[in-house]
Image (cartoon, helix red, strand yellow):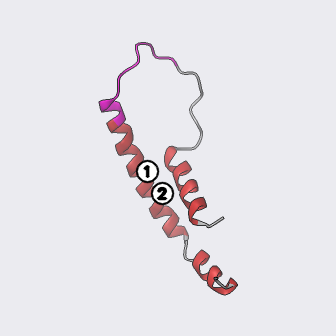
Amino acid sequence: MLKYKELQTIIAMITEDKVTELFCIADDFCNFFDAMMEKYTLKADKKRQYHRKSTMSKAEIMVIMILFHDSGY
């Protein structure tokens, strides 16, 4: 079982630079994935949009989810 001091050290390893790096990786993935989806999926006959565009990008949401799962909560 991890002691409190060891747990603090592990949590402190996630710096702002790591979050920025993770965001860049997630953003590159989202751009690639969106391009492949546009290329290989069927197109709808009519352009209907039922929901507003989200205010957060897909990459931002991915980073939050990755950091949450990495937190051990």
The amino acid pointed to by label 2 is Phe
Asked if the residues shown at circle 2 and circle 1 are in contact, with their CB atoms under 8 angstroms apart, the answer is yes
Residue 43 among those drawn in magenta: yes
Point out the stretch of residues depicted in magenta: 37-48
* Residue sitting at x 53%, y 58%: 66
- Position of residue 49 relative to residue 36, above or below, is above
- Position of residue 11 relative to residue 40, above or below, is below
Residue reaching furthest to the top: 46
* Residue sitting at x 57%, y 44%: 56
* Residue sitting at x 58%, y 60%: 69
Local SS, label 2: helix
The amino acid pointed to by label 1 is Asp
* Image quarter of residue 11: bottom right
Closer to us: 32 or 71: 71
- Position of residue 14 relative to residue 42, above or below, is below
Q: Which mark is residue 27?
A: 1
- Position of residue 6 relative to residue 69, above or below, is below
C-alpha separation, residue under disc 2 versus residue under disc 1:
6 Å
Magenta span: chief secondary structure: loop
Residue that label 2 marks: 23
Q: Position of residue 63 (x, y in %)?
A: 53, 55
71 vs 40, left or right, is right
Residue 62 among those drawn in magenta: no
Closer to us: 2 or 37: 2
